[in-house]
Image (cartoon, helix red, strand yellow):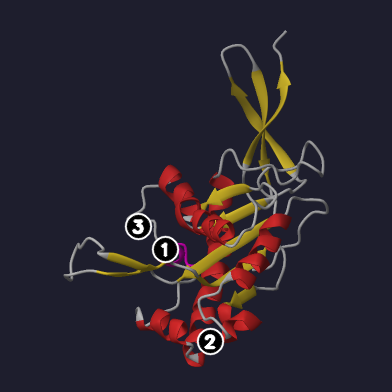
């Protein structure tokens, strides 16, 4: 889905990363303590997409010169991701607060990069858990239930092993899988967006009466909301359906 955004609206970036597992030695097969830790997890690839853009940005380790010498060197990959995050005002990811953003920050730190410019985070998994009692909060299940799409099948852990071994077919499949995750993420976010309150005000640079959630300028007056002493005008966005509380109206 491609949207036409209002000029000067905040920049929203959708993100999904894929990483290698940690590598270590253990004596048994189930629920083991690691005897010797061998290799930190590193980033394999990422996909990002700007809201309102048709372009889906996907990069993997194999897209950079350092990969020929060291298949575990993710320095160039994470630098490319750093540049995107440094440009973003809002970053949307599913389980992003617990995994994607923290893992990305860890790779920045390990590669000697400082923090990118600050951005607001929207975690669609947290949104789903906050507002709805769904049977599953997995991105795949939410996408299916909302009839907006589903994740691609990976074929299991052998796909990750194939990429770590440098298999070109596995890399192509991994990037296709990663790309679909972000396309699905955007569609799920657009369904959830009207419910997010408070949503970072994407229209803050447009005008004070624009929709906080989508930046739309067509708001309808829909009654009032009340505190103990103050009455507020209520508005609903005709573009995304989100509600907004308007200027304060004091009773005479």
Residue at x 58%, y 86% (from the top left corner): 68
Separation of marks 2 and 1 at Cα, in angstroms:
28 Å
In-front residue for pair 187/78: 78
The residue that disc 3 covers is 136
**Residue 231 in view in this figure:** yes
* Callouts 2 and 1 close, C-beta under 8 Å: no
The residue that disc 1 covers is 145
Q: Which residues are magenta?
A: 141-147
Separation of marks 3 and 1 at Cα, in angstroms:
10 Å
Instruction: Give the dominant element type of the magenta stretch: helix, strand or loop.
Output: helix
Would you say residue 75 sits in the magenta stretch?
no
The residue that disc 2 covers is 172
Q: Compared to 167, does 87 lie above or below?
A: above
161 vs 127, left or right, is left
The image shows residue 104 at horizontal and vertical percentages of 54, 59
Residue at x 56%, y 13% (from the top left corner): 228
Number of the front mark, 3 or 2: 2
């Amino acid at each position: 889905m491609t949207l036409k955004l209002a000029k000067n609206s905040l920049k929203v970036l959708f993100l999904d990363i894929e990483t290698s597992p940690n590598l270590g030695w253990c004596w048994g097969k189930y629920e083991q303590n690691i005897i010797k830790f061998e290799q930190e997890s590193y980033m394999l690839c990422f996909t990002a997409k700007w809201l309102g853009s048709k372009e889906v940005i996907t990069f993997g380790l194999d897209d950079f010169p350092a990969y020929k010498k060291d298949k575990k060197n993710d320095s160039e990959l994470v630098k490319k991701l750093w540049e995107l995050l440094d440009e973003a005002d809002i970053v949307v990811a599913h389980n992003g607060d617990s995994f994607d953003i923290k893992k990305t920050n860890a790779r920045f730190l390990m590669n000697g990069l400082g923090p990118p410019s600050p951005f607001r985070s929207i975690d669609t998994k947290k949104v789903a858990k906050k507002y709805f009692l769904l049977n599953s909060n997995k991105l795949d299940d939410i996408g299916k239930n909302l009839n907006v799409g589903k994740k691609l099948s990976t074929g299991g852990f052998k796909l990750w092993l194939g990429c770590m071994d440098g298999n070109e077919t596995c890399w192509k499949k991994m990037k296709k899988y990663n790309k679909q995750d972000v396309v699905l993420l955007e569609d799920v976010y657009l369904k959830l967006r009207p419910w997010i309150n408070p949503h970072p005000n994407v229209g803050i640079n447009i005008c004070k009466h624009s929709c906080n959630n989508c930046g739309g300028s067509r708001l309808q007056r829909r009654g009032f909301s009340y505190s103990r002493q103050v009455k507020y005008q209520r508005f609903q966005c005709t573009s995304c359906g989100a509600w907004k509380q308007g200027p304060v109206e004091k009773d005479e």
